[in-house]
Image (spheres, rainbow, N blue to C red):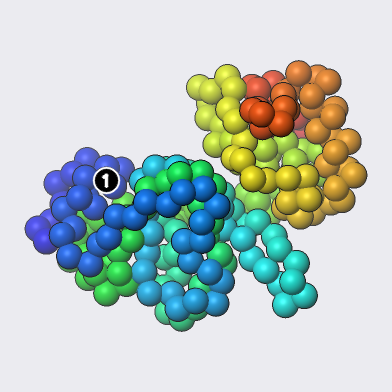
Amino acid sequence: MAPSTSPPGDWETLLTGISRGKTVLEYQAKRNIFIQGQPADSVFFLLRGKVKLSVISTEGKEAIVATLDSGEFFGEGCLAGQPLRMATAISVGACTLARVGKPTMARLLHEDRGLAEMFITHLLSRNIRYEADLVDQLFNSSEKRLARLLLLLSHFRKESRTETVVSGINQENLAQMVGTTRSRVNFFLNRFRKLGFIDYTNEAGLTVHSGLLSVVAED
């Protein structure tokens, strides 16, 4: 493969140029893409849709550790010598993925400087997000952590006014991710709704409004 001339961040164009070792896959909602404990032999790029990553403990407790939107890689641990999947990847709704085998991805990163730089930037951005999550857990209140989590799960952006939280996540999941009890999550959600920061219906799910940013911005 020749050195990339694609503009920074144009992952789809770069992946389109991969003719061998890549498979484009379509998944319907709530399908396992890979399962915790399976051999880690490929990297995935989310072209369309949303994916959640969950981990099950030895006691059988499940925790959602991340939700991913279009334009994100996952499963890249195999490139660092991870022999088995550390989490289960599940399609939230209908989604389209590009699966690139580990040998192909390793070769491309070695040969294509543009791709390697973009991939490193992607990993650094994810590490920054994880560091922010750690600081959030250590220093912020449960209410602020929940507000930040809802903004992350809805992939809320600066220009957004409303966004819908990824479906399939209930109050128990939110409690696990925030590190509090389900009753506290229910209390804060009701408070956010009364303040007009969120809306919630069984049909539309949970919608986040820009006012929720004020909770995260509070000292």
Direction from residue 90 to residue 197 in the image, left or right: right
Please tell me whether residue 90 is drawn above or below residue 199 in the rendered image: below
The percent position of residue 189, horizontal first and vertical second, equals: 81, 33
Please tell me whether residue 133 is drawn above or below residue 205 in the rendered image: below
The percent position of residue 64, horizontal first and vertical second, equals: 65, 56
Question: In the image, what residue occupies the spot 72% across and 77% down?
Answer: 58
Q: Is residue 54 visible?
A: yes
Residue that label 1 marks: 12
Question: In the image, what residue occupies the spot 56% across and 32% down?
Answer: 156
Q: Residue furthest left?
A: 2
Specify few, some or many for label 1: CA neighbours under 10 Å numbering under 14, 14-19, or 20 or more. some
The percent position of residue 184, horizontal first and vertical second, equals: 88, 43
Quadrant (top left, top right, bottom left, bottom right) of the N terminus: bottom left
Please tell me whether residue 26 is drawn above or below residue 144 in the rendered image: below
Quadrant (top left, top right, bottom left, bottom right) of the C terminus: top right
Q: Inspect the image, locate mark 1, and give the three-letter code of the amino acid beneath it.
A: Glu
Question: In the image, what residue occupies the spot 79% across and 27% down?
Answer: 192
The percent position of residue 20, horizontal first and vertical second, equals: 17, 65
Direction from residue 64 to residue 186 in the image, left or right: right
Between 149 and 141, the residue placed more toward the observer is 149
Q: Quadrant of residue 101?
A: bottom left
